[in-house]
Image (cartoon, rainbow, N blue to C red):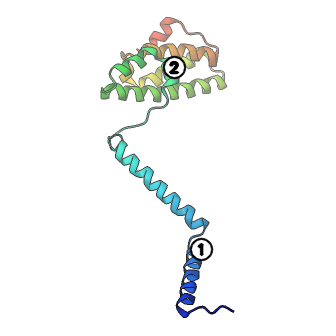
Amino acid sequence: MVKISLAVRERIVEQEKEKYMFTSVINWPVYLTACGIIAALYYVFVLFRYYRHELFKPGKRILPPLQEQSALFPQAHDEMKKSATDRHQIELTYTVHDLVDELRALLQQLASQASGKDDLLKSVFRLFKKYPALKGSGFQQPLTNLVAAESESHCNIRLTADELAGLWS
């Protein structure tokens, strides 16, 4: 049998203890949790480092994707691109998004109730009254066109030019 010196034997025992300690303290759940925390901290750092100005603007909301709205409002979309720094224009854009959402919900509701032309005109007129800032803006004509198209597709009601003009009065 090979005799091992006491110092070598102690060193081997220490190495075994270190090996055991490493594998007993760090297991998969601990490792994955640590990686998740590190990744979250990294993304928080990137968010604050590069987007802090957008995060701390008062009243800032994120716009929905512009693909659908540019097809509906080509003139208004061009206006928005020209004056993107104009706060009033940006607020009008948010107002338009709110109005379009409410308008679509209203038209779907009227279609499900099989309402007539008078009900549709009164409801849309009341809806437009809630958004006076849009009257006379660059969004008025595209919104009027949207009402005409959506009322015809959802409710099978064709509106005349006079009826559409009367919605904003």
Name the residue beneath numbered marker 2.
Answer: 122
Within 10 angstroms of label 1, few (less than 14), some, or many (20 or more) residues? few
Q: Position of residue 134 (x, y in %)?
A: 38, 21
Which residue is the extreme one toward the top?
A: 161
Within 10 angstroms of label 2, few (less than 14), some, or many (20 or more) residues? few
Q: Amino acid at mark 1?
A: Thr
Q: Nearer the viewer, mark 1 or mark 2?
A: 1
Q: Is residue 118 left or right of residue 144?
A: right
Q: Nearer the viewer, residue 61 or 3?
A: 3
Name the residue beneath numbered marker 1.
Answer: 23
Which residue corresponds to the image point at 37% horizontal and 21% vertical from the top-left? 81
Q: Position of residue 140 (x, y in %)?
A: 42, 16
Tell me how many marks there are: 2
Which residue corresponds to the image point at 49% horizontal and 59% vertical from the top-left? 37
Q: Which mark is residue 159?
A: none
Mark 1 falls on what kind of element?
helix
The answer to whether one can see residue 139 in this image is no
Quadrant housing residue 84 = top left
Is 121 rendered above or below residue 57? above
